[in-house]
Amino acid sequence: MKKTSIIPIFIPHIGCPHRCVFCNQWQITGHRGVPSPDDIRHAVDTYTASSREPRHWELAFYGGSFTAIPVDMQERLLQPAYEALQAGKIQSLRCSTRPDCIDGPVMARLHHYGMTIVELGVQSMDDSVLEKAQRGHTAAQVETATRLLRQDGFTVGHQLMPGLPGEDWDSLVRTTAAVCRLHPDIARIYPVAVLENTELAEQYRTGRYEPLTIPEGVRRAAYMKQQFIDHGIHVIRTGLQATADLDDTTQVLAGAYTPAMGEMVDSLRYRVKLFAVLDTLHQADIIISYNRRDTSRVRGYKNQTMHEADKRYSFCLHWQEDNTVAPGSIRAGDVELVIGK
């Protein structure tokens, strides 16, 4: 099976009818300006020429709200992508958009140009949280857009942002359950970071918003990710992609941003499941076995799980790689745990 590689095309703030309290797309993406058709052709040629082996190339329109931008601009951006698709240079197209920017004509246009994957900026399924975030759409519109896209044959993605103003654990649990019921094909989880030049930055400075700490962001994202995995939803990203702007402490003022978010979330997911089993065992020695691919997840970020286990349990634990254990699983003594990647 060929490895899938992404050719990212960023269109920050283009088409967005609302300025959400958390949003500064320039800093999130590290890109400014609108790409031209030639920019897209150049990106396709550059990325595909760099590969030393056959790959499944996917061109992705990120940022902004793709289906909300003027139709003529959509078509100018889609045409070179469609040409690359027809020529076999790329194999699929995806875009990100708002739940309230999906209807029959929109989907017909996307189909015409070969789009197969549409990700929705859901953020929360709690209407009070969406209102405080100034999203300009409702949870009901998420449900409608998801249903329409699925009925029309698209692969559907949901993007979530734990830690928005007004969200507590009850709200997070309700959002997670609602997404699981809608069952998108894929999901991304981006714990909130407070970016400079946003409404959220003003709320933070004036004490009207208490941002997540990194540990709390990890905890909320880990809960969501494990629930999604347990319901068969593939989580393709946890935490914002690192950029020079995001790594600038004058631009990220507070909140749950760290380049290691994904690794920390997976470490916590594995630790919770593993400790739940170890708490029930009373043997003198226990061998914990795992596939080599899962070593960092099982041992924990910076070996945190191993260190906490040493303090928590009086019996001896032996940690070993064993490729007879399936990826995404742990064997603790005679107990097999399936956790998911």
Image: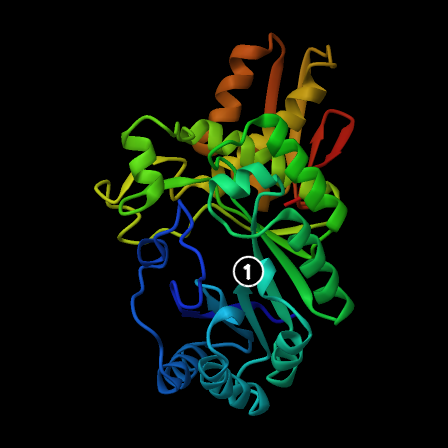
Q: Nearer the viewer, residue 152 or 127?
A: 127
Is residue 300 shown above or below 262?
above
Q: Quadrant of the N terminus?
A: bottom right
Label 1 packing within 10 angstroms: few (<14), some (14-19), many (20+): many
Q: Position of residue 134 (x, y in %)?
A: 46, 46
Q: Quadrant of residue 128?
A: top right
Q: Position of residue 24 (x, y in %)?
A: 34, 53
Q: Position of residue 103 (x, y in %)?
A: 66, 70
Q: Give left or right: position of 173 versus 254.
A: right
Q: Nearer the viewer, residue 287 or 157?
A: 157
Q: Give left or right: position of 199 versus 157.
A: left
Q: Give left or right: position of 209 versus 335.
A: left
Residue sitting at x 60%, y 41%: 127
Q: Residue furthest left?
A: 250
Q: Is residue 326 in view from this perspective?
A: no
Q: Quadrant of the C terminus?
A: top right
Is residue 73 shown above or below 97?
below
Q: Nearer the viewer, residue 121 or 5?
A: 121
Q: Name the residue that disc number 1 marks.
A: 98
Give the colour scheme of this rendering.
Answer: rainbow
Residue sitting at x 58%, y 42%: 294
Looking at the rendered structure, the secondary structure element under dot 1 is loop
Q: Is residue 278 in view from this perspective?
A: yes
Residue sitting at x 36%, y 77%: 35
Q: Position of residue 310 (x, y in %)?
A: 53, 15
Residue sitting at x 27%, y 52%: 245
Q: Quadrant of residue 102?
A: bottom right
Task: Check disc 1 and give the amino acid type.
Answer: Arg
Q: How many marks?
A: 1
Q: Residue furthest top?
A: 314
Q: Quadrant of residue 254?
A: top left
